[in-house]
Each structure stands twice: as C-alpha cells, then as structure tokens.
Image (cartoon, grey):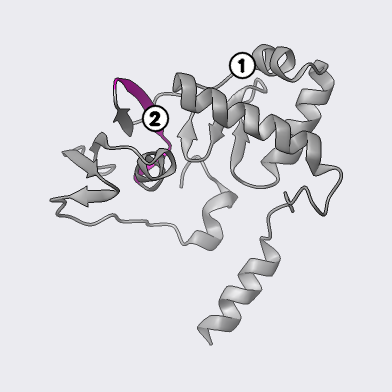
Amino acid sequence: MPEKMVERNRKSQAPMNLDVRRDERAKPDSSLRLFIYRHFIRKCKAPSIAEMVKGAGWSRKQVDTALRRLCESHAFVLQENGELWRAAPFSAVPTAFPVKVGNRSCYGNCIWDALGIPAMLAQDARIDASCGCCNLEMTLNVNRGRLQGARGIIHIAVPARDWYKDIVFT
C-alpha cells in the first residue's frame, strides 16, 4: 500500500525534467541554475536578476523565462517582484535558519534546508535556529558531515506531498 501511494504522489507532483542530455530546452536553464548556485556558494546570497542577465549574457526576458522553467522543478521559487526567493537549500531572504559556514553566513528556508547547506558544501557549519512554535533557541553543529550532539526532534507538520501547495507556509 505505501509503495502505491508514493508512486501516485511521485507521478502527480513530478518536477520538470532537468536532464540536459535528454531535454534541449533545459540546456540554457541548466547554465543559469549553475550560475545561481555558484553565486550562492561564493557570496552566500542570491544573484539579482540584473546579475543573472549580466552573468548569463542574456536578455531580461530570457532570464525570466528560464527562471520560470526552473521554478517548475520546485527547487527555485521567486518573490512577487521576480527576484529569487529560494534556490534550495539556500534562501535569498533572511530566515530563522542562519547557517555559518567558515567565515560566511547564509540562510536555509527551514531546518531541513539549513542542514542541507553544509551537506551540499561538504563543510562544517553552525546553525542557530529557533523553534517555530515556542521560539526556543537551538544551536546545531555539523562537523565532518555529522550532526554533533544533537538532541531533539525535527517536526515537519506538513506531509511532503503537500509542501508545494504553499511552500512559504511549509
């Protein structure tokens, strides 16, 4: 039974195919995605649309179109003004999940994403988070890819199948 539910949800919520070997349309999207992630990794902040236009050598319309397609993958979410809000696991806006990696600080969108940043970068990190319901401060340390001395529970109240119905709430 659970296998059928997982398969049904996978099919109904399937993200866009970003495999550039099979989808010619994805090639420019892939180069923009790479530009965005490299920018986040170097600067711990999102590139602006203007920086994407300049970095990609594209028109604003081309960047907007590629960003809309990247958003179909659910890894990217735009703000109302068209600027990046999220390129998972990074948040382009300050959140309650700051991640200190080396001498840089960036933000995760949630605790799950915050833990994904040191995993993605293969670096040690400190995450100064707080509980969403009671505001209790929590410090998490990741050392050599492992969460150190952590006690507690990560409570994900929204089922994964529903995350993208309202990703900001989730």
Query: What residue does disc 1 label?
Result: 48
Secondary structure beneath disc 2? Answer: strand
Q: Amino acid at mark 2?
A: Tyr
Distance Cα–Cα, label 2 vs label 1: 16 Å
Q: What residue is shown at x 28% (from left), y 37% (from top)?
A: 124
Label 1 CA crowd tier, 10 Å (few <14, some 14–19, many 20+): some
The image position of residue 114, as x and y in percent, is: 36, 40
Q: Mark 2 or 1 closer to N-term?
A: 1
Front in this rendered view, residue 168 or 62:
62
The image position of residue 70, as x and y in percent, is: 70, 39
Query: What residue does disc 2 label?
Result: 107
- Say whether residue 91 is left or right of residue 29: left
Q: Amino acid at mark 1?
A: Ser
Q: Quadrant of residue 6?
A: bottom right
39 up-or-down from 87: above or below: above
- Say whether residue 163 is left or right of residue 120: right
